Image (cartoon, rainbow, N blue to C red):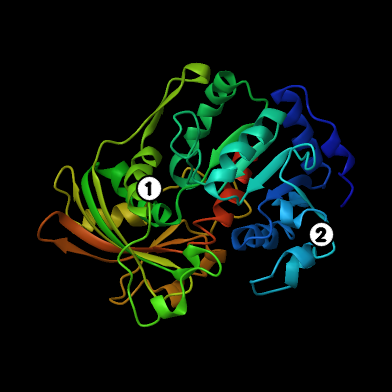
Amino acid sequence: MGSFQSATHTRPESLDTRKSTLAAIIASGGRIPVAVLGATGVVGQRFLRRLAVHPFFEPVYLAASERSIGKRYRDACVWQLDGEPWAGLGDMTVVACDPGAAPAPIAFSALDTEPARLIEPAFAQAGAAVFSNASAFRMEHDVPLLIPEVNAAHLGILARQRAARGWKGAIVTNPNCTTVALAGALAPLERAFGIEAVMMTSMQAISGAGYPGVSAMDITGNVIPFIRNEEAKVEVESDKILGTLRGSGISSGLHAADFPVSATCTRVPVLEGHTITISLRLRGNPSIEEVAKAFETFVPDTAGLSLHSAPSRFLTLSDLPDRPQPRRDAEADGGMRIHVGRLRICPILGFKFVSMAHNTERGAAGASVLNAELALATGAI
């Protein structure tokens, strides 16, 4: 369990005390004890693989559903990833998704939506900072929906969240895996010019459906032009991410961007990496050279923070005619980079291009871990 097991049983009385405690652990060269909720699923496994070697976070509680409680992790989890099986944690005992059974100051949630609605608030109420991959709270008005390089300031809404809900802890979410590839690519253009309208079509990897996911009979040699609830998520999440935080403290509020997004989401026979074709209309009639420059000169909100999980470059624009490609580009920077290419004129809306991101790293586990690093670096937790 490491040297901080006892620290998980002493819950800070105030946010300032908790910040000081977490900062002191890192300053001493230690690692903050964390819980992983839904640790036996594929996203939970990706959390564990990252956290097992993380310099600041130490996974000391692996939590899962009732059928896994009390089992060794190796017996409860069918390991699906490359690398060391069970991330070297196979002998740890799985505990309940309950703050009494997993009293860590930080929890990473790989829960499905419905369990998350009950479990994540229980942890936040008990004082944990919950970094969630679930969709349960993404669109709540007082819950940050973060891409750290794009809207780091949205962490400022946490003061209002704690005051309104009476929580000692907090919930911070990352976007849907398709939204990451869309909003990440739109951010430089919204910042430089303003966006008036977006149309997009996704070609989403089968790993986004979880394990065992889509049957081989359905996906082999096929494209499935429907993913339940996906289009609605993409259409609303992007506007929240690219909106602005107004006010401060408990009077702060998130104001969404106001451009419409029309989304079509499809499943394709690709293992990892969601690819999106995007057409959009920009304000101010910029040239294609100006649009390219906006991509190339975009300065992420995290510049200068040296976050462990952040890519060396948030976004790259390729001038090759056949990139980005999931097989060739998705794993760059540990799967945390956004890839853009094929920028050209659209005769209907103005401009069009292709965006691609690793759906289970940038769009899931890696995103939540990066959110936690940002919150620590900025003093939000």
Give whichever of 148, 8 is nearer the camera. 8
Is residue 358 something one can see in this rendering?
A: no
Query: For the residue carrying disc 2, how many other residues have a C-alpha within 10 Å: few (<14), some (14-19), or many (20+)?
Result: some
Rendering quarter of residue 344: bottom left
Residue located at (39% from left, 74% from top): 325
Is residue 319 something one can see in this rendering?
A: yes
Q: Amino acid at mark 2?
A: Lys
Q: Quadrant of the C terminus?
A: top right
Residue position marked by numbered label 1 in the rendering? 233
Give whichever of 39, 238 is nearer the camera. 39
**Where is residue 55 drawn, in percent x and y?**
74, 54
Image marks 2 and 1: residues in contact by CB distance under 8 Å: no
Q: Amino acid at mark 1?
A: Lys
87 in relation to 115, above or below: below
Residue located at (78% from left, 62% from top): 73
Toward the bottom, the furthest residue is 221
Count of numbered labels shown in the rendering: 2
Residue located at (34% from left, 73% from top): 323
**Where is residue 272 drawn, in percent x and y?**
48, 70
**Where is residue 177 drawn, in percent x and y?**
45, 56
367 in relation to 45, above or below: above
Give whichever of 140, 367 is nearer the camera. 140
Q: Is residue 168 left or right of residue 335?
A: right
Q: Is residue 238 left or right of residue 344?
A: right
**Where is residue 313 drawn, in percent x and y?**
48, 58
Query: For the residue carrying disc 1, how many other residues have a C-alpha within 10 Å: few (<14), some (14-19), or many (20+)?
Result: some
Rendering quarter of residue 71: bottom right
Residue position marked by numbered label 2 in the rendering? 71
First in sequence: mark 2 vs mark 1: 2
